[in-house]
Image (tube, rainbow, N blue to C red):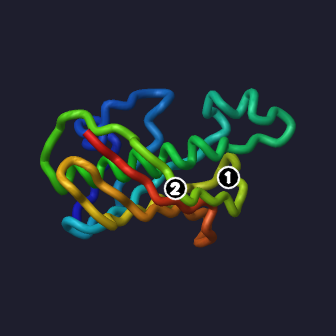
Amino acid sequence: MTKLDVHEILEFLPHRYPFMLVDRVVEYEEGKSLVALKNVTYNEPFFSGHFPAKPVMPGVLVVEALAQAAGLLVYLISGDKNLFYFAGIDNARFKKVVEPGDQLQLKVAVERRKRDVWKFKAEAFVDGVVACSANLMIAR
């Protein structure tokens, strides 16, 4: 099992504040899957406009957090530190609102790989409840 803190994640992901959406990797099954965390705080810049009276994390950013976790998994499996891109999303479903104070548990698992194109099953959980699920594609 590989655990990564934010400093180690910065070595792999090109994202930086305010767009880095993975705080920690807590589980890694070699070549197969990864579990990461995103601590959602009221200080996130998007909360001032989405929505001021009832702050909600935009669903597209939950999906982006999952894509970043998938990108980390690609880097860990391949050892390739070249840029990979979020290339596709299918079957996205949003089932729970994500609010300040929540901790997103991001679970991604490899479904297929063909050369530099990777497909993943991805799910984001809050307190053990699925907040979002999707099939993602990462490519170079």
Q: Quadrant of the C terminus?
A: top left
CB within 8 Å, label 1 to label 2: no
Helix, strand or loop for disc 1: loop
The quadrant in which residue 60 appears is: top right
Q: For this view, does 44 lie left or right of residue 21?
A: right
- Report the residue at 30% width, 49% height from top: 72
Residue 83 screen position, x and y as percent: 25, 34
Q: Residue lying furthest right in this view?
A: 53
The quadrant in which residue 25 appears is: bottom left
Question: What residue is disc 1 on?
Answer: 98
Label 1 CA crowd tier, 10 Å (few <14, some 14–19, many 20+) = many
Amino acid beneath label 2: Asp
Amino acid beneath label 1: Val
Helix, strand or loop for disc 2: strand
Q: Residue lying furthest left in this view?
A: 79
Question: What residue is disc 2 on?
Answer: 90
Q: For this view, does 104 lie left or right of residue 131?
A: left
Residue 114 screen position, x and y as percent: 22, 56
- Report the residue at 20% width, 65% height from top: 31
Residue 5 screen position, x and y as percent: 32, 48
- Report the residue at 63% width, 28% height from top: 45
Depicted 46 relative to depicted 137: above or below: above
